[in-house]
Image: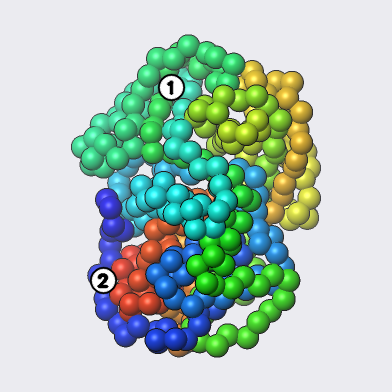
């Protein structure tokens, strides 16, 4: 599970040359993570964001780094697990290099079990985690009494996993940008810059649509001011993520909207999300909402990220489509892309390749 499954580790000539500067386009999590990994390995890097760092989906509020439930190991799950396992070292390195704190914490995740059928399914998944995944999630069913953060579970039982983590997305992006600069790279915001050598396109929903590889799906989230214990786990119930940030705030997210009028406006769909969050956590029942966010998240046609060399465009690579799980994928996506761009080693699973 340490490496992504389904790849053939094809070796190709390195693309960047000895001194060619690599242009990374896009100031979201994939662009910044790839830029940081390239700079960390000593490559000359210029990251170009035509708007501002975090202008797209990565600049939202949630920051949940949570794995899929145990099941058949797919290429996407393998990349995600590898990214989650590498996350602590990845973010610690970026924080040290850039002198900023992304507020990363591996505090785990709890999911309330509503009935006996859900309990049986959760226990079966724990066996899959043990037998097929090698206990990578440490997924198990626990009896827990309600407290001010997690409220009641209808059965008194919860699923806990220990691999889930959290961070503050906006701080995380700035941490990576600072690290790139500290490592000798350049970060350009608010304008475009012509490439001098190889390019990595990580341009979010708009870029995915321009390439004909996918589209944007709207999401909304809200930030509460709430005295959540700093070591509290994130909560997940019926598609609802509650994520404490360890700084006196907590986030609820997010909606998934394929049809919408305005991609950047919040509306009644978020109001409903806030109401559900208040019902799940007693600490949020009266907590004020201090920020609301809406934006487009890039989803490829396969719902998996699109990575690798762009067909028909020599020296151009793509890293896009981290729909909902981009932060959990980022450390492994950065490794795979840096291996390809710098070393010519193509370890990208076939199911995720751009072509």
Q: Residue at x 50, y 87 (%)?
A: 197
Question: Looking at the rendered structure, which numbered label has been put on residue 9?
Answer: 2
On-image quarter of the C terminus = bottom left
Which residue, given by chain and number where applicable, does mark 1 sit on? 158
Residue 48 in percent (x, y) is at: 62, 73
Disc 1 is placed on an element classified as strand
In whole angstroms, how far apart are the C-alphas of marks 1 and 2?
40 Å
Residue 68 in percent (x, y) is at: 41, 43
Disc 2 is placed on an element classified as loop
Q: Is residue 262 left or right of residue 8?
A: right
Q: Is residue 84 left or right of residue 171?
A: left
Disc 1 + disc 2, Cβ < 8 Å: no
Name the foreground residue: 193 vs 279: 193
Question: Looking at the rendered structure, which numbered label has been put on residue 332?
Answer: none
First reached walking from the N terminus: tag 1 or tag 2: 2
Q: Residue at x 64, y 18 (%)?
A: 282
Q: Residue at x 47, y 51 (%)?
A: 91
**Compared with residue 2, is residue 34 higher up or lower down, i.e. above or below?**
below
**Compared with residue 180, is residue 222 higher up or lower down, i.e. above or below?**
above
Quarter of the image for residue 144 reads top left
Residue 79 in percent (x, y) is at: 37, 55
Name the foreground residue: 113 vs 88: 88
Residue 177 in percent (x, y) is at: 58, 62
Name the foreground residue: 66 vs 33: 33
Q: Residue at x 59, y 36 (%)?
A: 245
Label 2 neighbour load within 10 Å: few <14, some 14-19, many 20+: some
């Amino acid at each position: 599970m340490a490496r992504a499954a389904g790849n053939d580790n094809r070796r190709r000539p390195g693309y960047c040359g000895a001194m060619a500067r690599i242009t990374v386009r896009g100031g979201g999590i994939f662009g910044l993570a790839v830029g940081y990994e390239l700079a960390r390995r000593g490559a000359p890097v210029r990251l170009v964001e035509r708007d501002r760092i975090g202008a797209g989906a990565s600049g939202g509020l949630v920051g949940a780094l949570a794995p899929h439930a145990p099941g058949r190991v797919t290429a996407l799950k393998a990349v995600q697990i590898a990214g989650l396992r590498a996350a602590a070292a990845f973010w610690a390195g970026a924080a040290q290099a850039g002198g900023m704190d992304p507020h990363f914490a591996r505090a785990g995740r709890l999911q309330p079990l509503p009935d006996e059928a859900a309990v049986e399914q959760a226990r079966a998944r724990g066996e899959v985690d043990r037998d097929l995944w090698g206990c990578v999630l440490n997924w198990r069913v626990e009896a827990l009494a309600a407290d001010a953060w997690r409220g009641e579970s209808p059965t008194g039982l919860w699923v806990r996993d220990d691999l889930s983590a959290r961070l503050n997305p906006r701080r995380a992006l700035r941490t990576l940008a600072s690290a790139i600069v500290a490592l000798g790279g350049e970060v350009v915001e608010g304008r475009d810059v012509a490439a001098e050598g190889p390019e990595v396109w990580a341009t979010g929903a708009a870029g995915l649509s321009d390439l004909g590889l996918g589209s944007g799906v709207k999401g909304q989230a809200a930030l509460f001011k709430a005295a959540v214990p700093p070591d509290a786990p994130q909560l997940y119930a019926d598609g609802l993520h509650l994520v404490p940030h360890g700084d006196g705030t907590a986030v609820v997210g997010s909606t998934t909207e394929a049809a919408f009028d305005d991609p950047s406006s919040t509306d009644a769909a978020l109001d409903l999300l806030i109401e559900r969050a208040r019902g799940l956590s007693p600490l949020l029942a009266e907590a004020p909402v201090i920020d609301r966010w809406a934006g487009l998240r890039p989803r490829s046609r396969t719902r998996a990220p699109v990575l690798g060399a762009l067909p028909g465009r020599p020296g151009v690579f793509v890293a896009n489509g981290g729909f909902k799980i981009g932060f959990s994928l980022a450390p492994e996506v950065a490794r795979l892309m840096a291996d390809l761009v710098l070393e010519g080693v193509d370890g990208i699973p076939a199911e995720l390749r751009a072509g």
